[in-house]
Image (cartoon, rainbow, N blue to C red):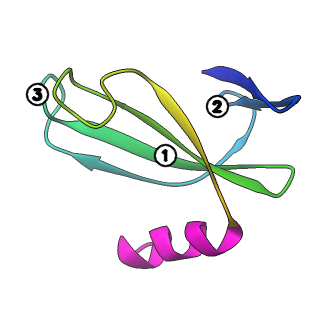
Amino acid sequence: MKLTIAKKTYDTKKDKEVAHRTFGSYGQIDGFEEKLFVNDKQFYIYGVGGVESPYAEPTIALMSDEDAESWKKDNDIE
């Protein structure tokens, strides 16, 4: 997915994936996947999932460095 926010482009095909987590199985209506990416020192989450998940539409959400570290810690990711 490619999205421009405040004149900065976030591209999940080019940016570095730092970590990911999945909930449920592929095809479940409430299952979803979150991937943590970094682009020019800006962290963001790319979320995608089923129609009843938090990511019914593919989403990019920007994160601070602190939030990214918290997300990794909360999900047991180093």
Measured as percent of width and height from the top left, residue 44 is found at 62, 48
Structural crowding at the residue carrying mark 1, measured as other residues with C-alpha within 10 Å and reported as few (<14), some (14–19) or many (≥20): some
Q: Which secondary structure lies at badge 1?
A: strand
Please give the name of the residue rendered at 34% of the width and 40% of the height, measured from the top-left corner. Answer: 33
Instruction: State the CA–CA distance, disc 2 to disc 3.
Output: 23 Å
Disc 2 and disc 1 in contact, CB within 8 angstroms: yes
- What amino acid is labelled 3 in the image? Gln
- Residue 70 screen position, x and y as percent: 50, 76
Of mark 3 and mark 1, the one earlier in the sequence is 3
Provide the secondary structure element on which disc 3 rests.
loop
Comes first in the chain, label 2 or label 1? 2
Q: Residues within 10 Å of mark 2 (few under 14, many from 20)?
A: many
- Residue for badge 3: 28
Tell me the magenta residue range: 65-78
Q: Which residue is labeled 1 in the image?
A: 35
Per the image, is 71 magenta? yes
Q: Which residue occupies 41% across, 45% down?
A: 34
Q: Residue at x 73, y 39 (%)?
A: 15
Task: Give the image location of residue 8, x and y in percent.
Answer: 85, 33
Within the image, what quadrant is residue 26 found in?
A: top left
* Residues at marks 3 and 1 touching, judged by CB atoms closer than 8 Å: no
Judged by its main secondary structure, the magenta piece is helix
Q: Is residue 6 left or right of residue 32?
A: right
On screen, 7 above or below 74?
above
Residue 59: image location, x then y, percent: 49, 30
Residue at numbered disc 2: 12
Task: Tell whether label 3 touches label 2 (CB within 8 Å).
Answer: no
Q: Residue at x 68, y 21 (%)?
A: 2
Q: How many marks?
A: 3
